[in-house]
């Protein structure tokens, strides 16, 4: 029997003719995943106070309590649904089955439980005077209340309060798809970033490990438009086709920004029988994934939509870092060191380097700290006055004869857009004026030609390089975690690292706003303390 959904057409048993002609093969979708829905058991764990060992208990005795010689601890209150940042799932529509990795206990490493938790906030502040602390308002309409709490200032950008725990990422003992019947698709969105190929390879390899047949993993070309543009065809991805792609920059799938027709995308997901869609993108890409999931639910299309957070600017909320960020910082240092060489080799030399950072100055801040050669760092989160900047550069000249200035591309836009009107690109990002070229001209005017300014913009060189070893490992784990999420039945979520542990997070929580550098936080304070940068407002 063929399934009919709210699009009013039966599911096709093969790809549309245009895609089938490519030799993608039959992508048959069975009418039902299983008739038995898993029973959701109550996630309740009692608090237990672990008593000190009694005289009758020996070292080798088995006990449910944790033993301490002189004190007791209270178990963390995990497992309660009202304490966890919940992630949507499709388990109520799907039948559970044992993981194919059960036979060897996931290669000897064991499985993650749905009751495993990761703390969202690693800090407990003594007062609002503590460095990096902020009073999060807990009352209605932003008014103070007894529910106000101290949180890290970076959490201020969240418009909703968060529970203390997140769901831990990883392989589950029970999965909700038959791997032999799965069709999966991968799409990369937005600007280039080191690590895109690494993530694609990680996803393909783990899908294959689960047992997804060859010919059932599709690469969607050139972003979301690749779903419905008749001139663009999907490609089949296998372990062989992704072998070694992590050594290349860019993405073998191509990418594009914005312009997605969600209804057409979901139609193709339904027609092609796609069970899992992996979206590798930033805030815009994840917002697209969220919209795709919403339309899939509206039309009863059973597809798990899972994101992998990509942002070279490192501007996605909550997670420790985005993939590609470490690589970008490493490469950005090369530009700063070149600027140092140029500046120090000239009389009154100024090395001016513009780095990525549309709304967040993480790359500029981190590269400035790491390189140790920067005298002034300008980021979008901190306003500055051009005349005060030039006067400070004069002071640096008096001390050392030259200066290195690092500026994030989004810094000083309030100076360039005095009317406050900034357009947006296809992804909804603000269109920026060139702050680097502007500063070069303003500094030249101030010094009346008596300064040798070298302006360096390494943006496209940084975006296009392969990953460093740390990022390469991170990308592989993110790709694996995304596949585990889909097989666990989770949807409308992304995988990321929080407090050094991998978690699943609901996409709507992450896309509320771009993550920004906290001007009162410890990281920014460490930099301006190290380079002795004064306020420039």
Image (cartoon, grey):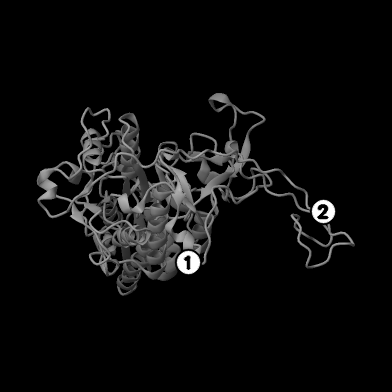
Q: Position of residue 126 (x, y in %)?
A: 69, 47
* Residue at numbered disc 1: 107
Residue 450 at least partly seen: no
Which of the 4 quarters of the picture holds residue 270? top left
> Quick check: 233 left or right of 306?
left
- Say which label, 2 or 1, has the lower sequence index: 2
The location of residue 171, given as percent across then percent down, is: 47, 56
The answer to whether the residues at label 2 and label 1 have Cβ atoms under 8 Å apart is: no
Q: CA distance from mark 2 to mark 1?
A: 36 Å
Position of residue 110 in the picture relative to residue 473 (left or right): right
User: Which of the two residues, 286 or 33, is positioned nearer the viewer here?
Assistant: 33
* Helix, strand or loop for disc 1: loop
How packed mark 1 is, by other alpha carbons closer than 10 Å (few <14, some 14-19, many 20 or more), is few
Direction right: furthest residue: 55
Residue identifier under label 2: 51
Residue 468 x, y percent position in the rendering: 36, 69
Q: In which quadrant will I find the N terminus?
A: top left
**Residue 27 sits above or below residue 293 on the image:** below
Q: Residues within 10 Å of mark 2 (few under 14, many from 20)?
A: some
Task: Determine the residue positioned at 31% across, 56% down.
Answer: 212
Residue at the limit of the structure toward the top, as seen here:
141
Quadrant of residue 197 in the image?
A: bottom left
* Most foreground residue, 329 or 166: 166
**Image coords of residue 380 (percent x, y):** 39, 47
């Amino acid at each position: 029997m063929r399934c009919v959904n709210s699009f009013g057409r039966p599911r096709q048993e093969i790809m549309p003719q245009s895609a089938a002609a490519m030799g993608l093969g039959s992508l048959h979708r069975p009418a039902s995943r299983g008739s038995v829905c898993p029973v959701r058991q109550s996630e309740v764990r009692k608090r237990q106070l672990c008593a000190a060992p009694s005289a009758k208990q020996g070292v080798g005795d088995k006990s449910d309590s944790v033993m301490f010689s002189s004190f007791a601890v209270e178990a963390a209150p995990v497992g309660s649904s009202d304490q966890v940042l919940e992630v949507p799932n499709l388990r109520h529509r799907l039948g559970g089955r044992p993981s194919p990795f059960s036979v060897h206990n996931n290669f000897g490493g064991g499985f993650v439980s749905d009751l495993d938790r990761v703390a969202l906030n690693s800090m407990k502040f003594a007062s609002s005077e503590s460095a990096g602390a902020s009073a999060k308002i807990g009352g209605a309409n932003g008014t103070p209340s007894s529910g106000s709490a101290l949180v890290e200032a970076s959490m201020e950008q969240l418009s909703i309060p968060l529970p203390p725990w997140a769901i831990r990422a990883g392989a589950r003992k029970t999965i909700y798809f038959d791997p032999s019947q799965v069709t999966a698709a991968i799409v990369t969105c937005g600007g280039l970033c080191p690590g895109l190929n690494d993530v694609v390879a990680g996803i393909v390899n783990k899908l294959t490990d689960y047992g997804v047949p060859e010919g059932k993993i599709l690469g969607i070309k050139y972003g979301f438009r690749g779903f419905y543009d008749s001139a663009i065809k999907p490609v089949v991805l296998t372990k062989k086709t992704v072998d070694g792609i992590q050594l290349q920059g860019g993405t073998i799938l191509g990418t594009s920004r914005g312009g997605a027709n969600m209804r057409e995308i979901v139609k193709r997901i339904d027609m092609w029988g796609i069970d899992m869609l992996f979206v590798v993108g930033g805030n815009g890409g994840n917002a697209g994934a969220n919209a795709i999931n919403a339309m899939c639910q509206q039309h009863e299309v059973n597809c798990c939509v899972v994101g992998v957070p990509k942002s070279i600017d490192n501007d996605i909320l909550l997670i420790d870092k985005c993939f590609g960020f470490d690589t970008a910082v490493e490469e950005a240092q090369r530009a700063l060191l070149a600027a140092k060489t140029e500046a120090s080799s000239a009389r009154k030399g100024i090395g001016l380097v513009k780095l990525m950072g549309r709304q967040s100055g993480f790359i500029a801040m981190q590269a400035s700290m790491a390189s140790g050669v920067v005298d002034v760092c300008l980021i979008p989160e901190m306003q500055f006055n051009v005349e005060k900047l030039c006067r400070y550069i004069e002071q640096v000249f008096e001390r050392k004869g030259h200066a290195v200035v690092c500026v994030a591309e989004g810094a000083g836009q309030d100076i360039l857009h005095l009317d406050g009107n900034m357009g947006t690109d296809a992804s909804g990002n603000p269109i920026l004026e060139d702050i680097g070229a502007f500063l070069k001209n303003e500094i030249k005017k101030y010094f009346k030609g008596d300064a040798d300014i070298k302006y360096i913009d390494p943006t496209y060189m940084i975006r296009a390089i392969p990953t460093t070893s740390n990022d390469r490992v991170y990308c592989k784990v993110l790709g694996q975690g995304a596949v585990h999420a889909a097989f666990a039945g989770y949807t409308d979520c992304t995988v990321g690292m929080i407090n050094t542990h991998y978690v699943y997070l609901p996409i709507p929580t992450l896309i509320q706003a771009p993550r920004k550098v906290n001007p009162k936080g410890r990281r920014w304070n460490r930099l301006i303390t190290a380079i002795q940068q004064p306020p420039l407002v």
